[in-house]
Image (cartoon, grey):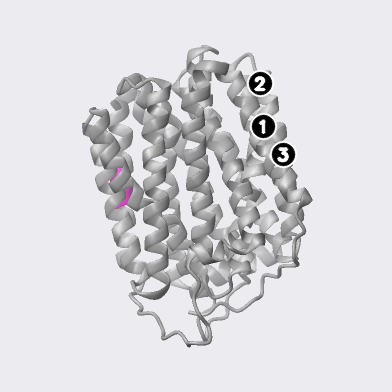
Amino acid sequence: MVRILEVSRTVLRHQGFAGLLGMNFLLGLAYSFVVPFMSMWGTLAVGMSPRQFGIFMTITSVSAIVLSTILASWSDTKVPRRTMLLIGAAGGFLGYVGYAFLRDPLTLAIIGALGLGVAGVNFSQLFAHAREELNSPGKVLPDAALLMSLLRVSFSLAWTVGPAIGAAVMVHFGYRGIFSAAAALFFLFFIGVVSFVPRRTHAPVAACVPKPTLRGALTKPVILAHFLGFVLLFAGFSMNMMNLPLLVTQQLGGTARDVGIIFGIAPFIEVPLMVWFGQLAARGHQVALLRFGVFVAVCYFLALTFVQAPWHIYPMQILSAASIAITTNVTITFFQDLLPGQAGVATSIYSSSFSGGGLVGYFTFGILMSVVGHRGIFVACAALSGTTLAIFLLYRHPRVTDRQPVAT
């Protein structure tokens, strides 16, 4: 605890890092307002079938993967990260404004593919910028794993209040209200980029130290194995994110308030867990933590198959918190350490696995929903997570440390 307080004071003494924490909070708040209610919006407000909604979300995910990959590659060599973040913030603002006021599925698909597809670059670029700031000459800052944990905690902290606030906004102002609020938060994020992210050009790269592309990085077996494993795991997470609100409101007799509570419990618990797991990761326990996090996810999805009332889900969110606190936190520094000097590409591998998981999850949800029903979806989530666990248990992992230098 003493070390955590020391790290927090060190970070807060640097205005730029304090600003990054605030920006990441805004980003998390924007997503927490809308993500828990997306499946309800698509099926109930827009009028899509589960299959159509799955296709709609698949299109957005494909676009996010392609655009974030291209932009991340440019951010490591050509375009300043500040510019990338400004583009991403503008995309999120315009995308959610479109979601607020339009209802034509084709138009919404185009808006989601372009606007929110570009906005997908924000998360990875914010972490890449923080990692490079951490390793810039002359700065005495805490180790990478714990700093990344604190930055990730700021995102998760937004989710402790965001779903509940989003539910209240939706009750009073409808879906237009939550999307308008998300757009406003992206506007504030844009202002934060202008205020706290300096414009820096990239230093010349020596010919003997080539910068690999994302495709080149994925040719390394250790990276490819974990990338595919996390694609499957995050596919389960995305299917659960769509399935759980519909189960609560359509089968268990719950309301939007119950959905807000359910999605607010896990992030509240994640905050201290992320800091703790970040400390363990800094001591060299990354692989063991990742295996444990995936195992907990399997247990969580299997437990959901037995729920009979909305309140049954409340205590189960503790399992969700533990799994997410590891797999969306430790994973970032794990990939960054596997590719030292490539913060943008490495973090993009993580974010692309998340987007790729969304792609698989959305598409699979649309196909399976009408065949296996809500509880069958949970079994499918457990099967995907179990496959990831098998990959991680069978794969021979190299020893990874968190103190490798990162070039800027």
* Dot 1 or dot 2, earlier in sequence: 2
Q: Nearer the viewer, residue 73 or 182?
A: 73
Residue type indicated by callout 1: Ala
Q: For residue 217, what is the image quadrant?
A: bottom right
- 10 Å crowding of disc 3: few (<14), some (14-19), many (20+): many
* Dot 3 or dot 2, earlier in sequence: 3
Q: Which residues are magenta?
A: 183-187
Where residue 346 appears, as percent x and y from the top left, is 53, 64
Foreground tag (1 vs 2): 1
Q: Nearer the viewer, residue 211 or 157?
A: 211
Where residue 206 appears, as percent x and y from the top left, is 48, 88
Per the image, the residue denoted by label 1 is 382
Residue type indicated by callout 3: Val
Looking at the image, residue 362 lies above or below residue 345? above
- 10 Å crowding of disc 1: few (<14), some (14-19), many (20+): many
SS state under label 1:
helix
Per the image, the residue denoted by label 3 is 296
Mark 1–mark 3 Cα distance, whole angstroms, equals 10 Å
SS state under label 2:
loop
Return the mark for residue 394.
none
Q: Nearer the viewer, residue 331 or 194?
A: 331
Return the mark for residue 305.
2
